[in-house]
Each structure stands twice: as structure tokens, then as C-alpha cells.
Image (cartoon, helix red, strand yellow):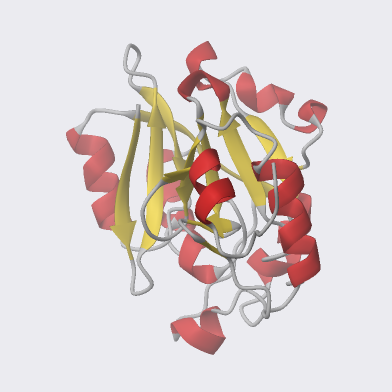
């Protein structure tokens, strides 16, 4: 089960990936409005095991510390996220957000499964995920691919018929396009893509309709 709520001034999608049998799960990108996120968790009697971050921009991390404090679960981010999480200018919270956001993750991972194997052990088998590093929007952008759900949480790498910005710190349009081609478009065509903003889409829809890609597959 994947559910979402949209939070904050920039309309970030916060996702809950939950095992329906055990009610254990993950929260991804708790960007703002911690009370709303916590109420959602409490109302559904979910037991959150991990907080995952797709990247370190302030609108995706703003409520992470409060959620961690309340629930006692670890914050997980890519190893390149350190500079974003720990610097309010780089994560843009003092540039656009108006409120300083700085934090540290409890564990920094890569797409090498060995770097996050221990995290999978605390989750029900149904929630097993794969980490795919997809830089270009930021240097730390990662996708969380849930094969059992035929779904990927993609952050700001790709949106429905659009892509993430590449003009902010650490962004690079060539790198971003390559990440989408090699990390998103190599997933099964019917994989559902859950972006950081806006509606969900699928791999095949983006191959056929995303204006940034005029190519044959």
C-alpha cells in the first residue's frame, strides 16, 4: 500500500509505504507540516520504521527531525546528501523557505545494496526496496524502487510529462537526462512513478509523452 499527503507551500508529496498485514512501513520525504504527517500515521495505527529522503532540498526534509523525534526512527539519505542537509543555503531553506533547516541523517547510503542491507532487515519482506542513484536535479537524488509494489518513489528527478530543475546547486541537465534514461526508463514499462510534486505517472507514459525525450525505445 502506498499512500500520500501533499504538504508545505511547494506542494511536496510525502509518501507512506505500508505493509497492510503488519501495518509497518516507511515515510518518504516528510517535507513540512509534521503534525499532519504524524496524525496520518496515528489515525491509521502505522508503525513507521524508517524515514527515507529522495534528496536534500528543504521542501522534502523540513519535517524529518520532528518525525524522528516523535517516532524514534532513523533518517536515511544518500551519502552526497550531507552537504545539503547540513547547510541551509545549499538545501535552499534560507534562500526560498524563510526558515532555516539543517539536520543530519542517521545513515548515509549509496545504491550499493551492501550500504543499506541492514535497513531492509528491519522491514517486512513486502517492503524490500532498491536504491538507484539518479543525480542531475541534485547530486544526492535517489529513487526508491519497490519491486513488490511495481512502483518507484522518484523525488524531483522526473514528473508527469516533465523533469526536475537542473539549474540549482549541484544540478546538471546532461546528468539528469542520463539518469532518467539509465535509471528510470530501464524499469519495467508499467512501473508507477511517484514524484515529489504532482500526479503519479508510469514509465511507458513518460517514454511516450515526456517532451524532454524525443527518441525511440
Where 163 sits versus 118, above or below?
below
Please tell me in which quadrant of the rendered image residue 156 appears.
bottom right
Where 47 sits versus 61, above or below?
above
User: Which x, y percent locates residue 211?
Assistant: 56, 64
User: Which x, y percent locates residue 197?
Assistant: 42, 60
Which residue occupies 50% across, 30% down? 190
Number of numbered discs: 0
Task: Work out whether residue 214 or residue 184 is closer to the camera in this orientation and state it.
Answer: 214
Q: Does any portion of residue 52 appear in the rendered image?
A: no
Q: Is residue 119 left or right of residue 100?
A: right
Task: Work out whether residue 182 or residue 141 is closer to the camera in this orientation and state it.
Answer: 182
Which residue occupies 62% across, 17% down? 121
Residue lying at the far front of the rendered structure: 216
Please tell me in which quadrant of the rendered image residue 114 appears.
top right
Quarter of the figure with the N terminus:
top left
User: Which x, y percent locates residue 177?
Assistant: 73, 60
Which residue occupies 32% across, 45% down? 4
User: Which x, y percent locates residue 54?
Assistant: 59, 51
Task: Work out whether residue 11 or residue 64 is closer to the camera in this orientation and state it.
Answer: 11
Q: Is residue 122 left or right of residue 166?
A: left
Quarter of the figure with the C terminus:
top right
Residue lying at the far left of the rendered structure: 43
Where 58 sits versus 135, above or below?
below
Q: Does any portion of residue 170 appear in the rendered image?
A: yes
Task: Work out whether residue 38 or residue 80 is closer to the camera in this orientation and state it.
Answer: 80
Amino acid at each position: 500500500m502506498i499512500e500520500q499527503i501533499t504538504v508545505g507551500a511547494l506542494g511536496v508529496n510525502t509518501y507512506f509505504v505500508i505493509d497492510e498485514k503488519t501495518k509497518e512501513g516507511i515515510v518518504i520525504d516528510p517535507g513540512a507540516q509534521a503534525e499532519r504527517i504524524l496524525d496520518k500515521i496515528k489515525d491509521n495505527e502505522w508503525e513507521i520504521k524508517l524515514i527515507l529522503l529522495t534528496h536534500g532540498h528543504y521542501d522534502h526534509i523540513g519535517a524529518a527531525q520532528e518525525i524522528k523525534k516523535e517516532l524514534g526512527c532513523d533518517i536515511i539519505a544518500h551519502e552526497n546528501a550531507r552537504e545539503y542537509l547540513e547547510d541551509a543555503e545549499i538545501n535552499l531553506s534560507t534562500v526560498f523557505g524563510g526558515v532555516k533547516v539543517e539536520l543530519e541523517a542517521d545513515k548515509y547510503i549509496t545504491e550499493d545494496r551492501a550500504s543499506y542491507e541492514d535497513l531492509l532487515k528491519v522491514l517486512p519482506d513486502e517492503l524490500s526496496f532498491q536504491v538507484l542513484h539518479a543525480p542531475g536535479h541534485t547530486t544526492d537524488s535517489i529513487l526508491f524502487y519497490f519491486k513488490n509494489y511495481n512502483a518507484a518513489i522518484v523525488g524531483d528527478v522526473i514528473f508527469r510529462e516533465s523533469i526536475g530543475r537542473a539549474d540549482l546547486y549541484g544540478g546538471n541537465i546532461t546528468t539528469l537526462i542520463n539518469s532518467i534514461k539509465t535509471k528510470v526508463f530501464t524499469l519495467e514499462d508499467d512501473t508507477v512513478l511517484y514524484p515529489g510534486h504532482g500526479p503519479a505517472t508510469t514509465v511507458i507514459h513518460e517514454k511516450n509523452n515526456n517532451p524532454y525525450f524525443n527518441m525511440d525505445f
